[in-house]
Image (cartoon, rainbow, N blue to C red):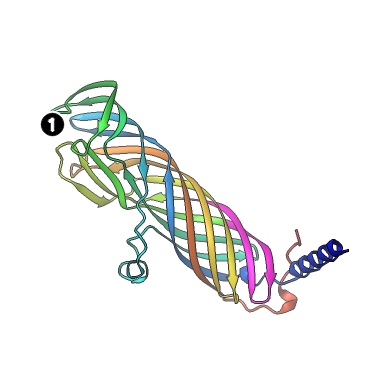
Amino acid sequence: MHNIKILFFIFVTFSFVAQRKPEAFKKGSFYFYWGWNRAFYSPSTIHFSGNNYDFQLYDVVAVDRQSPFNAELYFTPNKMTIPQYNARIGYYFKHDLQISLGVDHMKYVMLHDQPSTINGYIYNSNTSYDGVYVNEPITIAQDFLKFEHTDGLNYINAELRKSKRVLGVKHFQSTFLFGGGVGMLLPKTNTTLLANPRYDAFHLAGYGVNGVMSLQLNFFKYFFVQGEAKMGFIHMPDIRTTMNASDRASQMFLYNQFNVNFGVQFSLIKYSEAKIPKLPAD
C-alpha cells in the first residue's frame, strides 16, 4: 500500500509539471551567461613549415591551464577574462528552440620535454636541430619548441539548441538542452620555435564544430545555473608561429569541455496564459 501511494504521488507530480507553461524558455526570450570551463584535448600531429624547415611532430600532448580560484581574479571586471571562460548571448525564436553566439576561451599548452616522433628537415637554424628526420624519436625540449594557445584557444561560435523541460515547480524549473554549433578559431599563440624570437599575437587560424548538452536550473524565471558538456573538432590550418609571415603551423584535434555557467534571461514579448502553448508531456 505504501508503494502505491508513492507511485500515485509521482504520477500526480509529473502530471502537474507537464501542464505548466514554459516560463524559462518562451519565444522572444533573450539570455546571457558567463561561466568557466575545463578542457581536454586529444593528441595531435603538428606541421611546422618555413623558409628553412618543414617538419611534423606526431602524437603531441597538450593540456588546458585553468587559473586557480581567486575571488578577485574571477570576479573583478578587468581580470575576469584571464581564467578559462565561456560567454554566450542567445534568443528563443521558438518556444523550445534557441540560437546563440558565444566564445569559449580555452587554453592549450603543449607539454614540455615530452617524447614524440619527427619527420622532415631543418637547416640553417643556428641550433643543434639541423638535419633530415625520417620518423625519428625526439624529446620536445624548450630550446626546440614552446607552443601554446594561452590567451587563448578562442572558439567563437554560433549554436542551435533545443530545450526540453525536465521538472517545474513554483519559482523553479529544470531544463535539458542539446544541440550543436560551428565557428572560427582566433587563437593568441605563444610560440618560441628554434632560434626565432618569441611570437604571441591573435590570428584567425581555422574553424571548429561542436555538439553540446546541458542541464539548466532556473530560479524565479530570470536567473539560472547551467552545467554543460561539449565535444568538438578543431582544425587550424593557418597558425602563426614567428615574426616571419611565411612561418606557419597546422594541427587538428578533438576536445571535451565541461562548463559551469551563471546567467540571466528576460522576455521582450508579454504572453497571456491563453497564448502560451502547452509543451508535450514527454
Question: Residue 52, image x and y in percent?
Answer: 18, 30
Question: Residue 67, image x and y in percent?
Answer: 34, 58
- Give the residue displayed 81% in from the left and 64% down from the top: 6
Does residue 5 sit above or below 149 in this rendering?
below
Q: Which residues are magenta?
A: 161-182
Name the residue nearer the viewer: 147 or 95.
147
Q: Quadrant of residue 129?
A: top left
Does residue 36 sit above or below 271 in this rendering?
above
> Helix or strand or loop: what does disc 1 sit on?
loop
Name the residue nearer the viewer: 38 or 151.
38
- The crowd level at tag 1 (other Cα within 10 Å; few <14, some 14-19, many 20+) is few
Q: Is residue 94 left or right of residue 148?
A: right
- Give the residue displayed 12% in from the left and 29% down from the top: 124
The answer to if 211 sits in the magenta stretch is no
What is the quadrant of the C terminus in the image?
Answer: bottom right
What is the quadrant of the N terminus in the image?
Answer: bottom right
Q: Is residue 26 visible?
A: no
Q: Residue type at mark 1?
A: Thr
Q: Main secondary structure of the magenta part?
A: strand
Q: Quadrant of residue 41?
A: top left
Name the residue nearer the viewer: 170 or 47.
170
Question: Residue 53, image x and y in percent?
Answer: 21, 30
- Give the residue displayed 33% in from the left and 49% down from the top: 204
The residue beneath circle 1 is 127
Q: Is residue 130 visible?
A: yes
